[in-house]
Image (cartoon, rainbow, N blue to C red):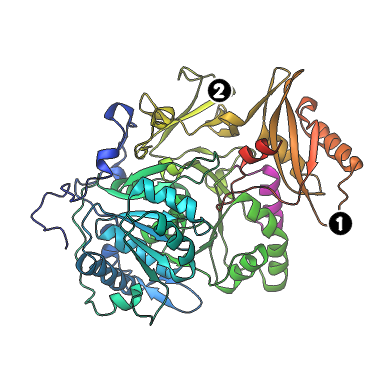
Amino acid sequence: MTLPHHLAPSAQRDRFVHERLPPTAQRPHLQFERAELQFPAQLNLVAELLDKATEKGWSQRPMLRSNARTLSYERVRQEVNRIAQVLTHDLGLVPGNRVLLRGGNSIGMALAWLAVVKAGLVSVATMPLLRAKELGDIIDKSQPTLALCDGQLLEELQAAQAQHPVLARIVPFNLPGQPGALEALAVGHSGDFEACPTAAEDIALLAFTSGTTGKPKAAVHTHRDVLAACETWPRHVLQATPDDIVIGSPPLAFTFGLGGMLVFPMWAGASVYYPDIAYTPQAMARLIHDVGATICYTAPTFYRQMAPFMKEQMAQRGTGALRVCVSAGEGLPDATRQLWRASTGIEIIDGIGATEMFHIFISSPPQEVRRGAIGKVVPGYSARVVDDDGVEVPRGTVGKLAVIGPTGCKYLDDPRQSNYVKDGWNYPGDAFLQDADGYFFYQARADDMIITAGYNVGAPEVEDALLKHPAVAECGVVGVPDEERGMLIKAFCVLKAGEASDAAMVKALQDHVKASIAPYKYPREVVFVDKLPRTETGKLQRFKLKQGA
C-alpha cells in the first residue's frame, strides 16, 4: 500500500538502510551555499523530474527512444505510475523496501527504475554481466525481497535466488504479452499514482561500486543527492537542452550511466536513445548519425576505438548533429583526446566523479579545456590537493584529492567509510596536482602511484605516452616489486593488428617513452597481451594486472 499522505515524510516503513548508515562523525559534511541547491525538506526526485515536466511544457516532447518506439514525457509518466501501482498495490511493497533491478539500458529498465524510486522504494540496480555469486553478494548486503529483471537475464539471478531466499520474487520485464511479466501486471492499472512523499534525506538508491579494487561497496544516495547532482555538473558544464538526443554506453546500473543516460536528460527536458543491439565502436558511430544524437557518453577506450569509424561516417554522411562528447569512468589520455578531436572536430568533456559522490565534480566545458588537465572544480563543490595529514599542498605539488559539496560518501554498513571520509571531506583515492589557475591534473589512483628509484611516477602518464605510439591499441601500466629500485614500471600492451610482438617492438616502445617523457618513466618490462582486464563500465582493473605480474 502507498504511504498515507498524513504521515511525516521521513517516516519510512522500512528503515533498513537508514539504520545502517555510517555514524554521524564519519559522514561527509555537505554544502548547499548556491541558490540552486536550496531544496525543501520533502522531496521525491521522480516527482520533480517527471511529474513537473508538464509545467515546463515538455509533456509531449520525446523522452525515451528505441528502434521500436518513442515515449513522450507524459507517456512515460503514465507507464511509471502503472508500475508503481503494481509495486505498492499488487506486490505490497512499502517505502524503504529495496528492489533489485537487473537489465541493460532499455526503455523497460528506465521505467522500472523510475517507478521504484517514485514509490519511495530503494533501487538496487545491478550490472547485466554479473554472475550468480556476485548477485548473491549484493542480495546479502541489500536484502531485497523483490527483483525486476530483464527477461533475457533471468538465469543468473534465479541461480542467486536459490542460494538467497530473502529474494522472494522475481518479476521479469521487457516481455510484453507474457503473463506474469511486469508489462502484463501493469496494463490493468489506471496510471494515476501520487509520488510517495519522501523526505529529501530519504534513500533513493544503493549504488554498488564497479569493483576496480575487487571489493565492491554499496554507496547510499538520497533523493536530494540526485537532484543536487543535476544542479551542478549538468547545469554548469554539460548545459543540455530539450532538443538534445543522448546516446552512450555506460549502464544505468552505474551512476555515470544513471546520470548521463536518464536523470540528467530528464532534468534538461531532453531525450535518450537506447539501442536494441550490443554496442561496438562501429555500431555506435553509425547509430550516432542514424538517430541524430547530439550528446554521447562513453569511456576513453571506446572513444579511441570509435575514432576511425566516426571519421569514416563523417566523410560519407557529413558532420551530423553530434556536438557534445563526455568521457568519465577512468582517466582520459591526452592521446585519445587529440585523436578524437582530429577525427571529429569535437573536444571531449573530461570529468572525474565517483559512485560515492554520484557523479562528476571536476570538469570543464570544451571552451575552457586545458591540455592534460581534467578541468576545474564544478560550481557547488570545493576541491583541494592535500598531504597525508589533510593539509593543502602548494600548487604544482602532487597530493591526494579531497572534495566537499552537496553530495558525499555514505557507505552501507561498511568499515571502509572512515577511509573515504575524513574530517567531513571525501577522499576519492586519487593523486592530483593543481596548477596556479585552478586546473586539476590527474596523476593516478593514490595506490597506483609507482615509486621507482625515489621517483614518483603516475601510471596514466606512461600509458598516455605508449598510446601515442602508432602500434599500440591499448595499454595498462603497473608497478611491480624490485629489490634494487623498490618498484619497476611494467607495461601490458595490446598491439594493433599486424604489429609484431617481439623484442624489437619492446625496444621501440621503450625508446618512444624515453623520447616522450622523462626517461626514468619508461617501462623496464613490456608484456604483450590480447586484451586488458576491464570492468563492465570500461575501467581498467590494474589490481588484476598486478596479480598477473
Is residue 317 visible from the viewing direction of this image? yes
Three-letter code for the amino acid on which mark 1 is drawn: Gly
On the rendered structure, is 277 left or right of 88? Answer: right
Label disc, if present, on residue 395 of the rendered structure: 2
Q: Which residues are magenta?
A: 331-345
Query: Which mark's residue is nearer the viewer, 1 or 2?
Result: 1
Rendered location of residue 31, percent (x, y): 32, 34
Three-letter code for the amino acid on which mark 2 is drawn: Arg
Rendered location of residue 149, percent (x, y): 41, 65
Q: Quadrant of residue 406?
A: top left
On the rendered structure, is 409 left or right of 51? Answer: right
Q: Is residue 117 magenta?
A: no
Image: 348 above or below 189 = above
> In the rendered structure, are the residues bearing label 1 and label 2 in contact, judged by CB atoms less than 8 Å apart?
no
Q: Residue furthest left?
A: 6
Q: Quadrant of residue 148?
A: bottom left
Q: Quadrant of the C terminus?
A: top right
Q: Residue at x 80, y 30 (%)?
A: 524
Q: Secondary structure at mark 2?
A: loop
- Residue named by callout 1: 498
Q: Earlier in the sequence, mark 1 or mark 2?
A: 2
Rendered location of residue 545, percent (x, y): 67, 39
Q: Residue at x 34, y 56 (%)?
A: 165
Is residue 239 visible from the viewing direction of this image? no
> Mark 1 to mark 2: distance in Å?
45 Å
Rendered location of residue 80, percent (x, y): 30, 68
Q: Secondary structure at mark 1?
A: loop
Q: Residue furthest right?
A: 504
Is disc 1 surrounded by few (<14), some (14 to 19) or many (20+) residues within 10 Å? few
